[in-house]
């Protein structure tokens, strides 16, 4: 993918085939105009090496990372597993990345060949204790904010010990406040949108608390959801020895819970902040259901492994067909329509 994106004629041909644009799908979100709502979730391009390549394949935005303040190798291998019968993945990568200084330098030197929106997802360095987490996030913010079209605070990966504890509002409030302040003092000519990414394993009351906190602090959005540590009740068909591997489960089995979390968030915050739906999105119908449930943007990752390079093309075409056959004039009109119809 990276090599193809470096060859002018080849990348133009690939983009023409795999990334045709549909005017009806254009969206405005997080202060950006995008060709469509469908982006690449964080985790695939950890070090910002494939932004143009993934845009060439049709993703409307690319979220890089997770990036930590210090470079780290991640957890010991083997750490990524395919659950083919379940169309799922289990990963315990552990935020393997080159560190925010190296990623910032790469972004600063980047000469884009495709116009796209680049999100930067930041997390906690593993060796940093929980009580020093805020300073760790601030360091990455100061290095990366200038190169980000939006920033995401990741407090929901299950593969960094203690990270999910930061989702508790008494920890999350000061963390997000300090990251917001760091972004504002680092980038003075524009406001860098700030989002938080949450886990599907949060209790409903905790989802409500994060939603209320996001509104209180003036966050720009919430990404719902990360991977799950759950296994029971998901109807998994893969070898039990495989499903027992530790790490975050993504893909089709997460679909229903991620959708439930999104619906709950939209019922709580409405259109006051931008919601990004991710988790188990495989088809255009999956993406459409997230939009109706309240997502302005949707993201995918795991299904790309199974669907291949024509995935974005199929999702975009299917979304355009659904919008055309719907009662909604624009994609923005469809956002949250499921809830508005119920409460009308």
Image (cartoon, helix red, strand yellow):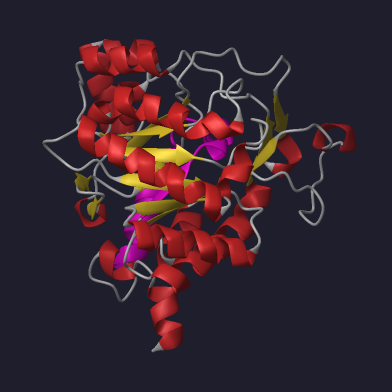
Task: Name the outermost residue toward the front.
Answer: 131
Query: Front-most of 110 and 306?
Result: 110
Q: Position of residue 30 (x, y in %)?
A: 26, 49
Residue 116 colored in magenta in the image: no
Determine which quarter of the picture holds residue 4.
Answer: top left
Q: Position of residue 156 (x, y in %)?
A: 57, 42
For the question of whether residue 281 can be seen, the reply is no
Note whether 199 is above or below 105 in the view shown.
below
Task: Report the number of numbered marks.
Answer: 0
Determine which quarter of the picture holds residue 178.
Answer: top left
The residue located at (31%, 26%) in the rendering is 142
Magenta segment's dominant SS is: helix
Note whether 271 is above or below 16 in the view shown.
below
Find the magenta span and give its range: 297-324
Q: Quadrant of the N terminus?
A: top left
Query: Front-most of 79 and 75?
Result: 75
Note whether 8 is above or below 79 in the view shown.
above
For the question of whether residue 197 can be seen, the reply is yes
Note whether 242 is above or below 104 in the view shown.
below
Q: Position of residue 39 (x, y in %)?
A: 38, 41
The residue located at (61%, 37%) in the rendering is 163
The residue located at (45%, 65%) in the rendering is 212
Determine which quarter of the picture holds residue 51.
Answer: top left
Please indicate whether residue 90 sits to the left or right of residue 265 in the image. right
Residue 316 colored in magenta in the image: yes
Please indicate whether residue 19 sits to the left or right of residue 238 in the image. left
Please indicate whether residue 255 sits to the left or right of residue 104 in the image. right
Q: Position of residue 132 (x, y in %)?
A: 53, 30
């Amino acid at each position: 993918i990276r090599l193809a994106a470096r060859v002018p004629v080849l990348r133009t041909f690939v983009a023409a085939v795999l990334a045709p644009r549909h005017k009806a799908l254009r969206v405005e979100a997080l202060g950006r105009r995008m060709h469509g709502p469908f982006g690449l979730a964080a985790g695939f391009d950890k070090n910002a090496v494939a932004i143009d390549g993934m845009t060439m394949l049709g993703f409307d935005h690319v979220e890089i990372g997770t990036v930590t303040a210090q470079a780290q190798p991640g957890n010991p291998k083997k750490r990524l597993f395919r659950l083919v019968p379940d169309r799922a993945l289990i990963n315990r990568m552990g935020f393997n990345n080159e560190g925010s200084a190296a990623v910032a330098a790469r972004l600063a030197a980047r000469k884009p060949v495709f116009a796209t929106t680049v999100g930067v997802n930041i997390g906690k360095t593993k060796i940093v204790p929980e009580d020093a987490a805020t300073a760790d996030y601030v360091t990455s913010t100061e290095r990366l904010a200038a190169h980000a079209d939006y920033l995401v605070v990741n407090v929901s990966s299950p593969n960094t010990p203690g990270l999910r504890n930061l989702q508790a509002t008494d920890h999350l409030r000061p963390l997000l406040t300090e990251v917001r302040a760091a972004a504002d003092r680092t980038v003075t000519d524009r406001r860098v949108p700030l989002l938080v990414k949450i886990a599907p394993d949060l209790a409903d009351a905790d989802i409500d608390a994060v939603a209320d906190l996001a509104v209180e602090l003036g966050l720009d959005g919430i990404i719902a959801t990360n991977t799950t540590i759950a296994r029971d009740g998901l109807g998994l068909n893969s070898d039990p020895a495989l499903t027992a591997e530790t790490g975050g489960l993504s893909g089709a089995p997460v679909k229903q819970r991620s959708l439930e979390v999104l619906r709950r968030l939209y019922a709580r915050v409405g259109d006051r902040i931008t919601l990004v739906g991710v988790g188990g999105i495989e088809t255009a119908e999956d993406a459409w259901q997230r939009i109706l449930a309240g997502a302005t943007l949707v993201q995918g990752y795991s299904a790309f492994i199974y669907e291949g390079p024509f995935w974005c093309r199929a999702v975009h075409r299917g979304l355009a067909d659904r919008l055309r056959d719907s009662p909604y004039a624009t994609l923005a009109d469809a956002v949250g329509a499921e809830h508005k119809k119920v409460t009308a």
